[in-house]
Amino acid sequence: MIEQLRETCKRLLEEGKVNVVIGYGQDSPGGPVHPVFVTRTDQVGRLVWNDRCFNNLATYLTRRDIKALGKPAIVVKGCDERAVIVLEQESQFKREDIYVIGMACDGVGSPRLAKCAACSVHMPRFADETIGVSNTESTADGRFAALDAFLQKPLAERLEYWMNELARCVKCYACREVCPMCYCNLCIVDKNRPTVLDTSATLKGNFAWQITRAFHQAGRCVSCGECARVCPAGIDLSLLNLSLARAAEEHFAYHAGMDKDTPPVIGSYALEDKENFIL
Amino acid sequence: MENAYKPELMEVLQVTQHTADVKSVRIRFRDPAVSEKFAFRVGQFGMFSAFGAGESTFNICSSSTWKDFIEFCFRRTGKVTDVLWRLDEGDTIGFRGPYGNSYPMEQWEGRNLIFIGGGIAMPPIRCAIWYALENRAKYGDITIVYGARTVGDMVFANELDEWEQRDRTRVIRCVDPGGETPEWKYEVGLIPHVIERSAIPAGNTVALVVGPPIMIKFTLPVLDKMGIGKEDIYTSLENRMKCGIGKCGRCNCGPIYVCKEGPVFSLAQLSRLPNDY
Amino acid sequence: MSQTITLDALKRLAGEWIAQGKRAIGPVRVKDDFIQYASLTDADALMLSGFVHPANSIKEFLFPRTEPIYTYRFKGQAVELGDCEPNAGEQAIIGARPCDAASVAILDHVFNWDYKDDFYNTRRAATTIIALGCTDFDDECFCTSVGLGPVAEKGADALLIPMDGGFEVRCLTPKGEAFFAGKTQTSDKSAPVPAGPEVKFDVAEIRARLADNYEDPAWREIVLRCLGCGACAYVCPTCHCFDIVDEGTAVGGARIKNWDSCQFGMFTMHASGHNPRATQGQRQRQRIQHKFRIYPEKFNEVLCTGCGNCTRNCPVGLGVLNTIGQLRAFVPPVEG
Amino acid sequence: MSDASTFEPKIVAYVCNWCTYLGADQAGTNRLEYPSNVRIVRLPCTGRIDFNLIIKALEMGADAVLVSGCHPGDCHYTAGNYHARRRWILFRSLLETMGIDLERIHFAWISAAEAKKFQQTITEITEKTRQMGPYEGYRRVCEAGV
């Protein structure tokens, strides 16, 4: 698949259809995989594809420094592609302004990440060009297993768990910067008139920050799992996002980034939304 | 334990509004013992605290010879200046300083002085102007060029009249084209052009230029053409600061900390720095 | 002749230290495969083998991520300020990697030049650092490139070097001797000196390149993937930039010193909106310049101990080691 | 631990300006007494009641929070309460995962004419919160040092 990917990118650059290819690269064989930006045909050799392509490259589509490079082609896995769809729904770009290269993906990480074991988009669906075929059958039922296990704990124990976990948060905002959905020019946590969230990494400030971050992804998070992977404090942030993703599915049958035409869940409403807690 | 970050409590003596969004405030130490020992040199700055909002960096714009108060001037742009905007006489704010280096007034003795300020940059040059006028004999001719966008944006405009009366002191005021009012009887034009056509003698002269980067960028070539060397042109940088004492890394620009080795630099020194300011 | 101590004796010593109500800190398995320096409630949690480098650094215990520096209360038009002394109870960091122990000797400079930061100094004085020599390393370690090594003694009060049956103990300062007083045995065996990673770059060459090539075109290209988070700065033993903010209510509150990072856009944003470092390339340049040219010029110390934490924690595989690697390998694109 | 009878809970009520606030006002004009434990904060619409306000109330020591506005269909801004309803449904699942006590976060529709319902709601919430005692959980979060 790597050869095919390089051929495609070489052609795209030569024909001038794109100015930059946002893909994955590896400095040394077996070394860590990281994002690369290929702007010249003689650089396509830097592009790789293997089961260590963790980053969700869609986060670069809204970055000023990257947009300045011109029309991008972006290499996406199925989960990344869902992020591209949500960004398109939120009119961050017009679909024809980017060229999507979908990679058939049998899951990343060895052992496979939890998100991949329960992935339903092994084959990208909206790419301009898809490379490779995945015959891993999509089983989406196990994806809330970790969340269900966690919710068995009684209320006080859950709060205790988060008090221990979030005590380690240093507010480095890596979870915000890797997330394709976090593209605000000035994040609410950087605003000070008024200061809604404490900037200090006290437990109080960390609770307010993580609740805000998770809820701003309600109905938008595509469960790519990057926030949990990059957290230097080892906090399993995906639990928060998964609980919101499930609520969106159960109450509004909404799956983020799966279908371009259903309106975003928070941006719309239905007269007959059901609930049982309003007095 | 000695807390280098803890400010002195100050009492607000007087608040003066200059323009729609610029005020200057006179403050005095609540503790007379500290007031006694306090001294600073013109050009130095301090960190001014609006408790509950934060601290901001402003030049001390009063002359160092005035003993019973210090003054600072600010434009209302953010959280701290919002609180400072609502100050009344008798309120309490914090101050710590003086920080940074200062204008080398001794080195400038015997020289002609040109003070050039743009808009809100009047305060950093005002303290030096008053100091020079209070030691008038030590300095040659003094030329003050002050420009603002509109007549309403002039800061310390009343003091320009006072300075005009002083001997061997020439005041050139200007507003940007379109900023003048019918009764405006002074220059109209951008500062660099006004300087060019004002035929200011430039022999044995030191220039202090403070203002927005765009103004400085176009004023320097004019001064260069007048024959004022790079080591005789000074400016005061406006970096974002938090600690003011060389610890927090914010004002780091190339090899120097603006809060310690600055904010006053000669053009010669600045040309050796990366333009990270 | 050398001093030695067994693992059990060391753990008992740590237990006594805790029993005396003093704080003991060391590498702890916080979660399944996640190790961090953390306060110990009981000595058994102390991990002295089976890991390369914890996910954080010991900076946290001398320069905390957030600490109030004084409080204020409004009394009508007056304000009352209150002091915030750091709770500088005696603390021992047992099992700090040499690249973490070295950080204190580096940070002492910035926190003590001209003005003294007594919040740091008070904790520093109350801290005994027992370094733990490395027996192995990973691809991200590069201590040998910045003048340190697996058994470097810089910044440590005592050094433990693993050997069969326990550790060789080298007491380096009075604090170290006081910590191990009477707890070590003399023996003729001494620990084998482990090999460190091979040198990956020369700091003098990097410093020269940074000094005479500020507008290096490399910066625009090699750090395009940097996302501008604070992970590299916050896991770094020597990054010391901080922010000062007020947090409180209408009645009063505290002025708080928080960690900050030069990688955030707001770090140098002027009130006028002008930002001298508007692009991520400029910010990454500042990080490497500050560590390998500015701090050495000002304090004659490289602001990096080669622990590799920034590279291990970077979401996009940058960090000092990779950034410098790419800077050296960068060939400007031939135009046309 | 103050026993349940003498503990006075702090309740924060975020109410919409067009319905519930007028309902509360009408309760006042009708001399309908309701516990003074409630601190009423008026906002233009439930659509404007940001979830951060609920967290801020808990941070500042509230033992229970009420968010109330117009019944679906009555919203002065047509759809503010519909959007709010969706948000509340999703936000409650996040709070549940975080271990924040949903028994202390109440949502209601109270129209300008329902002074009686406003009185009952506030009284019920105050009594219930008094039984539950102060919200120690979130207080520990806010007072935890580093």
Image (cartoon, coloured by chain):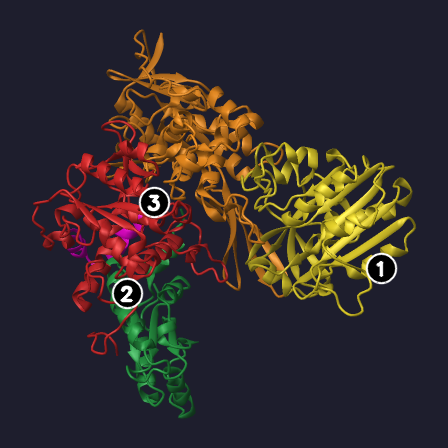
Chain colours: A red, B yellow, C orange, D green
In the rendered structure, does residue A162 fall within the stretch colored magenta?
Answer: yes
Q: Could you tell me how far apart the alpha carbons at marks 1 and 2 are, in whole angstroms?
A: 63 Å
Label 3 sits on what residue type? Arg
Disc 1: CA contacts within 10 A as few (<14), some (14-19) or many (>=20): few
Local secondary structure at mark 1: helix
Mark 3 vs mark 2, foreground winner is 2
Q: Find residue C176 and report its image quarter.
A: top left
Please state, as top left, top right, bottom left or bottom right, where the C terminus of chain B lies in the image. top right
Query: Could you say which disc has been placed on residue A168 in the image?
Result: 3
Q: Residue at x 29, y 67 (%)?
A: A266
Q: Chain of mark 1?
A: B
Q: Is residue D144 left or right of residue C139?
A: right
Query: Could you say which disc has been placed on residue C110 in the image?
Result: none
Mark 3 vs mark 1, foreground winner is 1
Q: Relative to residue C159, is residue A224 depicted above or below?
A: below
Looking at the magenta stretch, what is its main secondary structure? Answer: helix
Nearer to us in this view, B5 or B31? B5
Tell me the magenta residue range. Answer: A146-166
Q: Chain of mark 2?
A: D
Are dots 1 and 2 on a single chain? Answer: no
Mark 1 vs mark 2, foreground winner is 1
Disc 3: CA contacts within 10 A as few (<14), some (14-19) or many (>=20): many
The residue indicated by pointer 2 is: D91
Q: Could you tell me how far apart the alpha carbons at marks 3 and 2 are, in whole angstroms?
A: 24 Å
Q: Position of residue A267 (x, y in %)?
A: 30, 68
Nearer to us in this view, B186 or A171? B186
Q: Could you tell me how far apart the alpha carbons at marks 3 and 1 are, in whole angstroms?
A: 61 Å
Query: Could you say which disc has been placed on residue B161 in the image?
Result: 1
Are dots 3 and 1 on a single chain? Answer: no
Q: Find residue C27 and report its image quarter.
A: top left
Q: Position of residue B137 (x, y in %)?
A: 91, 42
Q: Is residue B223 left or right of residue C197?
A: right
